[in-house]
Amino acid sequence: MTAAAAPRSSRVRAVRIWLTLVATLIAVMVLVGGATRLTESGLSIVEWKPITGTLPPLTDAQWHAAFDGYKQIPQYRELNAGMTLGEFKTIFWWEWSHRLLGRVIGIAYLLPFLWFLWRGAIGPEWKRALWGIFALGALQGAVGWWMVASGLSQRTEVSQVRLAIHLTLALIIYASIVWTLRRLSDRPPALAAARLRITAIALLAMTLIQLFLGALVAGLRAGRVFNTWPTIDGGLIPAAERLWFETPWWKNLYENHLTVQFDHRMMAYALWALAALHMIDALRTRAGAAARGAVGLFLALTAQAALGIFTVLYAVPIDLALAHQAMALVVLTLAVLQAERLTAAREDRTALDRSPTGRLAVPSEPFRSA
């Protein structure tokens, strides 16, 4: 290894470690957010204090002040009247932990990023991408408060639509980091048929849509009704008048418990079927790493479907619900890796076709030497 290559390689490793840490923290935050929702803790802190809110109540007077603030919202009056201070502390710690993780992620992302920029290690193309991820993270904080605010005046819970947007944005940030990590890894060229790339991208898009639909189910607590499978509301396909009784009709897509759960189930079937076709195609064409990725994604989706079925049958116990959410992160990770792998394969094919030597050129290094 040359003297110039050594620091460049070490910097790439440092960036991979940094982004892996941030992705791990986001995954933990998604699971803590799921537990916060399942324990009905998300409205326990009724103020947004990005700086001073870092510290929890430290005295009895501060705890009582926080509890008094919670007593002013509809959730306490209609659902938790008579709650003790000790019970309030339990839900408070879930929400405080969730918000603290958000702050930690912001610091864990921004400070190393600024250090890499100061060292002049990151090229222009990667600067834009990494600043874009940071901007999405800043937006996520605002969306989180926008979500909480929806449950402070007229509702006893947050808006399921805002909850779904909040979760989906977190997963888009996570997926963006995983994609970037994959692009920074050393890998051999992976050439595959164009249709595999198309189905891989479709699987990634459908996975994100399915996660959005799952968040609607969670926000409405729709998983605690219609606890049968494969039937729902007495049949494989519910009666149209039960699916579309809200007016205007489009409100059923996010307000009707039956329609929301049915949509989530139908998307799961479609996603599983496309993953099976993608896997069969990848194996048939002997697509190498893409075939292994397709098998892994299909198996993860199968496990996720099984967890979803048991979660519904047992009316959403917290352990199964969190396992279902954790497996969703696994599925998303594998879908991102597969889509990136096959997108890169297309770029490799383009480079190969254009190369006068018939060999792939070494890609440009995104991290400069000293």
Image: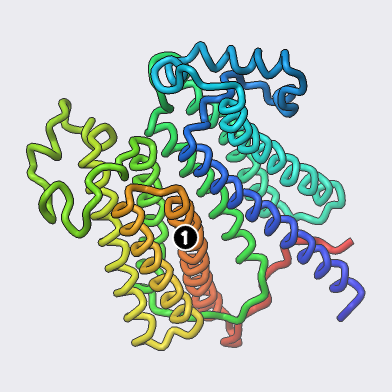
User: Is 7 on the left or on the right of 270, as rendered?
Assistant: right
Q: Amino acid at mark 1?
A: Met
Q: Note whether 235 is above or below 79 in the view shown.
A: below
Residue at (50% x, 74% y) in the render: 345
Residue at (21, 34) in percent of width and height:
252
Using residue 296 as the reference point, say whether residue 91 is left or right of it: right
Q: Position of residue 31 (x, y in %)?
A: 54, 48
Q: What's the coloring here?
A: rainbow
Quarter that holds the N terminus: bottom right
- Could you say which is closer to the camera, residue 153 or residue 347? 153
Judge whether 359 appears above or below 248 on screen: below
According to the picture, the residue beneath numbered tag 1 turns out to be 327
Query: Residue 78 location in percent, x, y?
Result: 39, 17
Q: Residue at x 63, y 17 (%)?
A: 66
* 289 to the left or right of 66: left
Image location (x, y in percent) of residue 259: 21, 41
Q: Residue 118 location in percent, x, y?
A: 85, 47
Image quarter (top left, top right, bottom left or bottom right) of the C terminus: bottom right
How many numbered dots are placed on residues in this image? Answer: 1
- Choose top left, top right, bottom left or bottom right for residue 101: top right
356 versus 236 height, above or below: below
Q: Secondary structure at mark 1?
A: helix
Q: Which of the two residues, 236 or 166, is positioned nearer the viewer here?
A: 236
From the viewer's side, name the closer residue of 111 and 351: 111
* Disc 1 packing (10 Å; few <14; some 14–19; many ≥20): some
Q: Residue at x 76, y 19 (%)?
A: 59
